[in-house]
Image: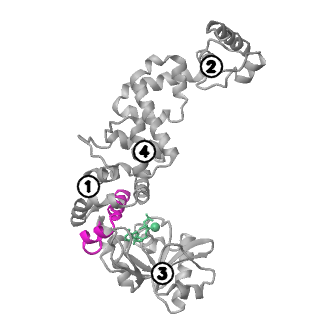
Amino acid sequence: MGFESARGRGSAEQAAQEVAAALQDNGHQAVFAGGCVRDRMLGLDAEDFDIATSATPEEVQAIFPKARGVGEFFGVMLIYNRGWPIQVATFRTEGPYSDHRRPDHVSAATIEEDAARRDFTMNGMYWDPVAEQLLDFHGGEGDLAEGVIRAIGDPAARLEEDHLRMLRCVRFAARFSFRIADETERAITAHRSGLEGISRERIGEEIRRMLLHDNRATAAKLLEQLGLAEAVLGKSVTGWAGTPHLEVLTGAMTRAHYATVLSAWAMDRGEEESPSELAMAWRERLMLSNDDRDGLVEVLEIAVQLQSDWADLGMAGQKRLASQEWFEASVLLLGVDQPELAQQVDQRVESLRPSGLAPPRLLGGMDLMEAGFPPGPSFSEILEAVYDAQLEGRIHSEAEALDLAKEIWQKTGSGN
Ligand code: ATP
Ligand code: MG
């Protein structure tokens, strides 16, 4: 661990360093703050280098004429240096949080006050890139070395102020494989129901970030153990049996699609509603996009279908199912509870693959019209029946397809 080892590597860091140096040259205090200090102390590449400064936004503007204020945040200016966006925030203190999510007011402050408003000790450190000095007012370095996440100040009061911090705590604990300090953990357990008052967007975003990380299973375990999953999803589980479905996505599917991850989480929680009911509820709770909701429904529905009637589907039905976008994810998750069935399905699909799971259709609506069929509602039925025959290898050419279409047409009496 140590900041020095990482210095001079990324040009984002260099760009931020130059900005801090310019502010210091003009007589202001200016240091790296928060997540980037933590990440660099851990030897990780920091995502963004945020600067905290004693300069007011006007003073920042005077030194960097192109700087502009960042929307809703108090005293945060955005500066581009070497093409890197760097946020420069004036040290601030926050007033009371009467709504438990946003401070009633914020005001300029000292660096010590700025540190005190931050959430966890490991997020409350500063690095002076000119003096090459760490500023650590709350024992962040020690906690980082021990792998502990600890609220700054009185945990109960800090979590009460902003309930979202409970989810941030879980996200960081999972991401770094850290443990949560006892008192901080007790405060979470005591305040968990407060999460219900937090905006769905912010909750959804935290859950998304923790579940898209490779340590998603750890995050889900913590959410369950701390009673936060119930607060987030509005439902407790009976007989929760761990996270085998989420674990199967580790490694092999590190970059799993969010819909797959959510499906795994639903399976781990033993959710019993129908896939569409569940997806409707989760969409609201987690502010899912339409794509994620649809994916979630499909992964779960395919799993249901595989369990109830895979063998009875016939070749065409199996090919149709196997060529669906979410099929593989579904089989992978099914394999956790029913490895034999999943293996049978995989083998069957491999044997079907050479003849084409979703070959281009031999016959389309235009072909039927050209052949003189009067357009009508029976068109799609005929076309699907012909495609089934194609998938089953009963027909191989357009001519055969057309003959079959005629046969079906006459048999079903559609011509009358
Ligand atoms: P990440 O790598 O996820 O971005 P981060 O620590 O940089 O982690 P940000 O959300 O970018 O997190 O916030 C930057 C810093 O602002 C944090 O390190 C922390 O000091 C402070 N902070 C952010 N959100 C809160 C909050 N809800 N309560 C208190 N301090 C916060
Ligand atoms: Mg950050």
Check the image and report above or below for 180 versus 392. below
Residue bearing the label numbered 4 = 261
Disc nearer the start of the sequence (1/4)? 1
The span from disc 2 to disc 3 (Cα, nearest Å) is: 67 Å
Q: Is residue 153 magenta?
A: yes
Label 2 is placed on what type of residue?
A: Tyr
Distance (Cα) linking label 1 and label 4: 20 Å
Mark 2 burial class by Cα count in 10 Å: few <14, some 14-19, many 20+: many
Query: Mark 3 — residue?
Result: 129
Q: Quadrant of residue 343?
A: top left
Q: Tell me the kind of residue under disc 3.
A: Pro
Residue 68 seen anywhere in this rendered image of the structure: yes
Distance from Cα at disc 4 to Cα at disc 2 = 33 Å
Residue 203's label in the rendered image is none
Q: How many marks?
A: 4
Residues at marks 4 and 3, CA–CA distance in whole angstroms: 40 Å
Tag 1 near tag 3, CB within 8 Å: no
Q: Quadrant of residue 33?
A: bottom left
Q: Residue 403, image x and y in percent?
A: 70, 9
Q: Is mark 1 within 8 Å of ligand 1?
A: no
Q: Distance of mark 2 from mark 1, alpha carbons? A: 52 Å
For badge 4, the amino acid type reads Val
Residue with the mark numbered 2? 387
Question: Is residue 98 within the magenta segment?
Answer: no
* Residue identifier under label 1: 226
Which one is in front in this view, the residue at disc 2 or the one at disc 3? 2
